[in-house]
Image: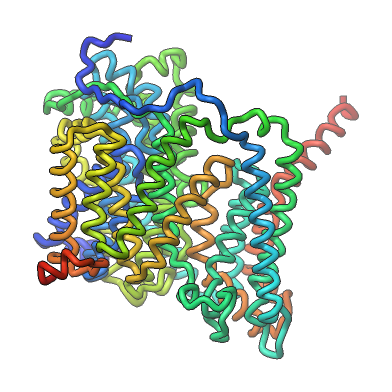
């Protein structure tokens, strides 16, 4: 491989290590999901049965269509449960390694906090915090760059959605103080 | 021809500065979305959909479809320069595209990719122009049983022909149909599966689910990978473009074959991914010199790109004519149509002529404008990849949140989006396909209504689905497709049993 004319290089300072131990196998995840789906199918099936899954003089009742779908979903997840239990291939495959899980959490937890913060601070302030925080903490990017990018992006979003296109977003104390 | 006259009218609707500007804007956004890792056609269209809520339907669909074309073009840039397919359908492009870039022929490869994309979609758009009105006038004779049979056919072909484990496709589909049923029952007005929650009353919005399933989950998946990259930068000069175009006629067989494969797979729910691989493999098989593939052969770029674009475009044909999307992105565009109060399907051609022909004309124009745009701006887009993912990821999250909230102005939808993000992440990792889920979610209510209306019409007699030749053959075909693997296997074992007897 010639590297003579490689001109664009981007580094990843917090990349997950390749030799990290596995947290769990695909099989375990598959079994867990199948069980959850089975419970969901039972719950929805019961609810539709209560609504009425039979026939009226005019045709099928409200619960008819979803009831039989719950039966299909339940059947398929039961089959999936057994198939996952018996599968040797899935047992040997890694669902997620520890390093990968750490990285996934590094984006999931901030997203969760962002959704929470959005209810109190409004979308735009929460966005600013999310972008600046994420760039600084996960990307190890210089603080001034992080703050500047976050500010510019949030401002562009505000102008596009709130001013140009009139799409209403959740707002918090800052917007109220600015009179928007 | 009537179609040509209407198409000309469509062009007349489009040729205003405002529309052309929107088109450019959509294309730029689309290429952007296609180039960035962790964002693709369906996500891009879903996230940007709220931007169009305040526009009139024609401008909105023009912009959205241009985002789609842009994303299709954008995928090729990263495949060739960085060996990173921005989209699953550009994987086949990397086989020969990246070696070409390594040999310093990046500009040539990019020109080839863009030109063949253009040719592929042009062939598919022509197909749509002449076939869509015919199919829809035929479909105007459809009643509820026929429509239900067509929906059934779509669902069954996913299960029967999909490459994933059958039970996983069934799970994905029935889950989608169930979630579509949450909330108020459209026929009787009764509430179901709401468990007393007023938030669930509205039902699960299709677009919120899509933003979570494709946008958020894609970020989670992308974060698992090592995100460092190295690639080639390239500018395209007019000389290279003309040189590639001069050689184009030599490859007409490859181009035609790939366009045909793409159109065919686009209409049936096989999709652009299968088409691009098939186009590549067939080009290799029919080549006089198959060993040179994978080492930087320009045909290896032509073949998959033509097929992927032809199929991505052809996927819009069943959506327009029958109201059944042929791909994930088409499903989202369909969701958009419903937001603007347009009912996709054959009636669209009668009731909203302006809209339909404006859309078809925009496919022609969008591709021409797109080709010029990508050829001139590649260096700018390639340098987008210099932006570290740690900066891009939170921006995508914010865009997803804006998109999800704007649809119904509900905070609950944000949580729903987050939930679907986790579901999408887990489903992708354990091999439950998301395309049937998306399709079921968008078609669920219509399929149920069609079923119940036919039941009401027939007084509860299932024989209505075999009551005439048309509906009967569609229903039978659906059931054959559902059990296709079993039939295929049985057929295989019968011939195996017969063969020794003959010999």
- Tell me the quadrant of the picture where the N terminus of chain B can be found: bottom left
**Residue pushed farthest right?**
B501
Residue B501 seen in this snapshot: yes
The residue nearer to you, when weighing B401 against B97, is B401
Please report the residue visible at 32 percent of the width from the left and 42 percent of the height from the top. B72
Give x and y (percent) for residue B388: 25, 33
Please report the residue visible at 59 percent of the width from the left and 51 percent of the height from the top. B158
B121 vs B427, left or right, is left
Give x and y (percent) for residue A103: 41, 35
Query: What is the count of numbered marks?
Result: 0
Give x and y (percent) for residue B312: 39, 47
Image quarter of residue B40 = top left
Give x and y (percent) for residue B464: 69, 76
B476 vs B397, left or right, is right
Please report the residue visible at 13 percent of the width from the left and 43 percent of the height from the top. A148
The residue nearer to you, when weighing A146 against A67, is A146
- Tell me the quadrant of the picture where the C terminus of chain B can be found: top right
């Amino acid at each position: 491989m010639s590297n003579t004319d490689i001109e664009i290089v981007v580094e990843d300072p917090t990349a997950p290590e390749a030799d990290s131990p596995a947290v769990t196998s695909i099989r375990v995840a598959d079994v867990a999901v199948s069980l959850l789906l089975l419970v969901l199918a039972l719950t929805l099936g019961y609810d539709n049965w209560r609504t009425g899954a039979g026939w009226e003089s005019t045709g099928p009742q409200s619960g008819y269509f979803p009831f039989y779908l719950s039966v299909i979903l339940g059947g398929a997840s039961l089959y999936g449960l057994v198939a996952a239990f018996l599968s040797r291939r899935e047992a040997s495959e890694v669902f997620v390694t520890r390093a990968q899980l750490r990285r996934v959490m590094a984006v999931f937890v901030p997203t969760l906090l962002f959704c929470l913060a959005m209810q109190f601070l409004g979308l735009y302030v929460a966005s600013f915090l999310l972008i600046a925080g994420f760039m600084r903490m996960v990307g190890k990017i210089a603080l001034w760059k992080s703050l500047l990018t976050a500010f510019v992006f949030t401002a562009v979003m505000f102008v596009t959605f709130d001013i140009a296109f009139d799409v209403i977003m959740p707002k918090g104390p800052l917007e109220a103080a600015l009179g928007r | 021809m009537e179609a040509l006259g209407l198409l000309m009218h469509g062009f007349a609707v489009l040729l205003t500065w405002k529309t052309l500007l929107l088109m450019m804007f959509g294309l730029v956004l689309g290429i952007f979305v296609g180039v960035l890792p962790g964002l693709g056609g369906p996500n891009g269209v879903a996230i940007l959909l709220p931007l169009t809520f305040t526009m009139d339907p024609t401008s909105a669909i023009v912009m959205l479809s241009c985002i789609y074309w842009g994303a299709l073009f954008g995928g090729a840039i990263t495949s060739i320069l960085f060996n990173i397919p921005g989209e699953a359908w550009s994987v086949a492009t990397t086989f020969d595209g990246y070696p070409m870039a390594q040999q310093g022929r990046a500009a040539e490869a990019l020109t080839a990719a863009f030109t063949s994309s253009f040719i592929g979609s042009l062939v598919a758009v022509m197909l749509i122009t002449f076939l869509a009105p015919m199919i829809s006038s035929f479909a105007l004779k459809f009643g509820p049983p026929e429509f239900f049979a067509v929906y059934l056919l779509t669902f069954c072909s996913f299960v029967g022909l999909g490459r994933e484990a059958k039970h996983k496709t069934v799970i994905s589909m029935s889950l989608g149909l169930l979630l579509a049923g949450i909330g108020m029952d459209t026929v009787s007005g009764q509430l179901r599966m709401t468990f007393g929650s007023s938030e669930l009353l509205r039902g699960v919005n299709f677009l919120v689910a899509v933003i979570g399933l494709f946008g958020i989950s894609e970020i989670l998946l992308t974060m698992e990978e090592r995100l460092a990259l190295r690639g080639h930068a390239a500018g395209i000069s007019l000389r290279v473009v003309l040189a590639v175009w001069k050689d184009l006629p030599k490859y007409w067989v490859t181009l035609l074959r790939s366009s045909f494969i793409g159109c065919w797979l686009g209409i049936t729910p096989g999709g652009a991914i299968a088409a691009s691989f098939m186009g590549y493999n067939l080009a290799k098989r029919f080549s006089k010199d198959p060993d040179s593939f994978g080492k930087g052969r320009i045909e290896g770029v032509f073949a998959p790109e033509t097929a992927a674009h032809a199929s991505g475009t052809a996927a819009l044909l069943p959506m327009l004519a029958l109201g059944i999307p042929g791909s994930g992105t088409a499903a989202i565009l369909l969701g958009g149509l419903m937001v603007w109060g347009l009912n996709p399907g054959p009636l669209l051609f009668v009731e909203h002529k302006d809209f339909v022909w404006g859309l078809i004309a925009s496919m022609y124009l969008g591709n021409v404008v797109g080709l010029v745009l990508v050829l001139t701006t590649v260096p700018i887009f390639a340098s987008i990849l210099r932006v570290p993912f740690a900066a891009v990821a939170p921006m995508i999250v914010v865009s997803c949140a804006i998109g999800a909230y704007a649809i119904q102005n509900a905070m609950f939808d944000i949580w729903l989006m987050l939930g679907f993000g986790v579901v999408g992440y887990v489903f992708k990792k354990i091999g439950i396909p998301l395309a049937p889920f998306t399709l079921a979610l968008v078609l669920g209510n219509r399929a149920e209504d069609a079923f119940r209306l036919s039941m009401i019409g027939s007084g509860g007699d299932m024989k209505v689905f075999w009551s005439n030749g048309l509906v009967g053959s569609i229903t039978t075909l659906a059931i054959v497709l559902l059990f296709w693997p079993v039939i295929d296997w049985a057929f295989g074992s019968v011939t195996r049993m017969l063969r020794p007897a003959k010999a």
